[in-house]
Image: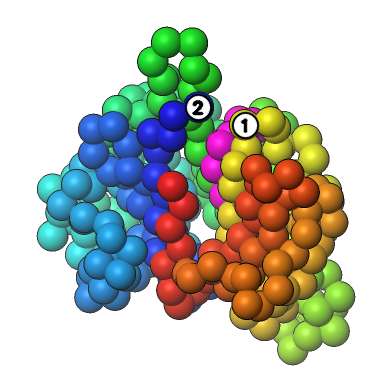
Amino acid sequence: MTPTLHLSVLASGSKGNAAVVEGPRGSLLIDCGLSWRELTRRAESAGVELRKVTAAILTHEHGDHCSGLGVVRRNLSCELITTAGTAAASRRLLDVPFSLVRHDEAFEVCGMRVELFPTSHDVSDPVGLRLSVANEGDEPQDALGWCTDTGFLTAEALGALRGCRILGIEANHDTSMLAHGPYPSFLKSRVGGETGHLSNAQCAAALPQLVGEGTETVVALHLSQKNNTPGACIRELSEALGAQPLGPQEVSAGSLAEARGRDGSLTICVAGQDEPLVVW
């Protein structure tokens, strides 16, 4: 397969989220919970040209995903896309000129086919997405899956995320750390519930049915800074796929933790809150 999609996770976590997917005809911004200054700093660090962003998709209305959309609107000439439920769910979004889509819709943007699917979070109408580009000749499609902020993986999510070359999937918390951590009981119940966030264990349980022969990179997303660690996450995900965690001296730049499949064709890594992670 000839890679035609490139992912730069500029931030992933409860303090702010933003990712850029470079396609054949422009780049797509997934969420923006960063200030313009921070977005541009991280983009420069990751080698991302923000002027190429021609569309932005908002997955849901929580502030760590949407607080920077105002500055994106002012500084980038790009189409803003979300569901009607998300657009109407927050006062800060009411005046944003969104192109509205359904949570089961497919459309074309930046030379990529975007397939949306519903997720399960305590918001109005959240979505995940699969991006794909048809390669020339008999080569299979290059595809990227993105799913975060969900209490469980819906049937639609499982179908859409299967077999992607790059799979970005939430691994928010370690269940033991959450149970014995500093959060009050109501917040523990929210995070660990069916409209909360995927745990390491839930993510690991899903990976064997999502990772196929063409999957090259699994990126763990939205790790909790209080209820998870990159090491705990990598260990659990690696075990599910028979991969081998790498020692600290082998961890590549820009990655907080990493593992490799036994034949070297699969990499498992963690996107962080503070530094960009680039996947080609």
Is residue 170 part of the magenta span, yes or no?
Answer: no
Q: Which residue is mark 2?
A: 1
- Residue 220 or residue 258, whichever sits in front: 258
Residue found 73% across the figure and 84% down from its top:
183
The colour scheme is rainbow
Residue found 59% across the figure and 47% down from its top:
217
Q: Which mark is residue 214?
A: 1
SS of the residue under disc 2: loop
Amino acid type assigned to the residue bearing label 1 in the image: Gly
Q: Position of residue 123 (x, y in %)?
A: 55, 54
- State left or right for residue 187 relative to residue 75: right
**Which segment is the magenta one?**
160-168
Q: Is residue 268 above or below residue 228?
A: above
Amino acid type assigned to the residue bearing label 2 in the image: Met
Instruction: Return the disc, 1 or 2, that comes first in the chain's sequence.
Output: 2
Q: Is residue 203 above or below residue 212?
A: below
Residue found 23% across the figure and 39% down from its top:
26
Q: Position of residue 62 (x, y in %)?
A: 47, 63
Q: Quadrant of residue 135?
A: top left
Q: Position of residue 117 (x, y in %)?
A: 56, 34
